[in-house]
Amino acid sequence: MDDIVIRPAEPTELDVVAGLRWRWILESGHQPVTGREEFVRHFVDWAAENTGSHRCMVVVRDGEVIGMAWLAVVQRVPSPRALLRASGDLQCVYVIPGERDGGVGGRLVEAVLARARDLGLERVTVHSSPRAIPAYARRGFAPSPRLLHAPVTRTDLYP
C-alpha cells in the first residue's frame, strides 16, 4: 500500500482520467451516449475549462493512474460572519477493480478532504452509492437532516 502516491492530476494525465470515467460507466452497466475517443476529447477539454472549480486527485502506482476523485468547489454567498465562503462536493471517486478493498479508496478520500481543508472549505458533501456509504462514514461523512435534494434532470442519464 505504501507504494502508491496520491496527488493532483497533471494536465497530461486527463486522458487517462477520462479513460477511468469511461471504464466506470461500462462497469456500471450503462451505455455511453458517444464514442470513447469523442468522450475523452470532450472530458479533457471540459477539465481544462473547469480548473477553477473542479480539482482532480489521482492515485498512482508504479507510474500508472489507478484511481481518481474530483473535488468540485462552489463559492457560497458572503455572510456578515465570513465574507469568503466555499463548500465542496466529492465527485467521481473511482479505483480500478484490482485495487479495491485494500484502503486505496479511503486514502484517496482522505487526500481530497485534506485538500478541502487547505482550501478553507466549510463542508464537503458526497452523493454515494449504497455500497460506499460505510467507507465515507469511516472518513467522517454523516447523513444530514438539513441537506435535501430535488431531481431537476433526467435521472436515467446518471449512475
Image: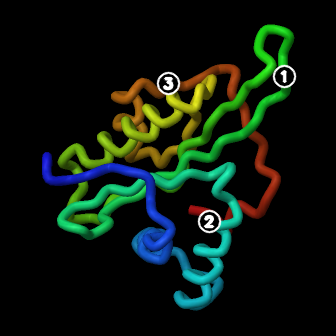
What amino acid does circle 3 point to? Ala
Task: Examine the rendered structure and indicate whether residue 52 appears above or below residue 98.
Answer: above
Q: Secondary structure at mark 2?
A: helix
Give how far across and how far down residue 120 sits, in percent: 59, 26
Label of residue 78 in the image: 1
Amino acid, disc 1: Pro
Classed neighbour count for the residue bearing mark 2: other residues with Cα under 10 Å, few (<14), some (14–19), many (≥20): some
Q: Secondary structure at mark 1?
A: loop
- How far apart marks 3 and 2 lie (CA) works out to 29 Å
Q: Is residue 21 visible?
A: yes
How far apart are the alpha carbons under marks 2 and 1? 27 Å
Can you tell which mark lies on residue 41?
Answer: none
Neighbor class of circle 1 (other Cα within 10 Å; few <14, some 14-19, many 20+) is: few
* Of the image marks 1 and 3, the number of the one nearer the N terminus: 1
Pick whichever, 101 or 48, lies toward us.
Answer: 48
CB atoms of marks 1 and 3 within 8 Å = no
- Residue visible at 59% across and 74% down in the picture: 44
Estimate how packed mark 3 is, as few (under 14), some (14 to 19) or many (20 or more) residues with alpha carbons within 10 Å: few
Q: Check disc 3 and report the residue beneath it.
A: 142
Front one among 54 and 135? 54
User: Measured from the top left, where is residue 147 in percent x and y?
Assistant: 68, 27
**Residue 72 in the image, given as x and y percentages of width and height:** 62, 46
Q: Which residue is mark 2?
A: 47
Q: Which color scheme did the rendering employ for the protein?
A: rainbow
Q: Is residue 54 left or right of residue 152?
A: left
Q: Amino acid at mark 2?
A: Ala
Nearer mark to the viewer, of 1 and 3: 1
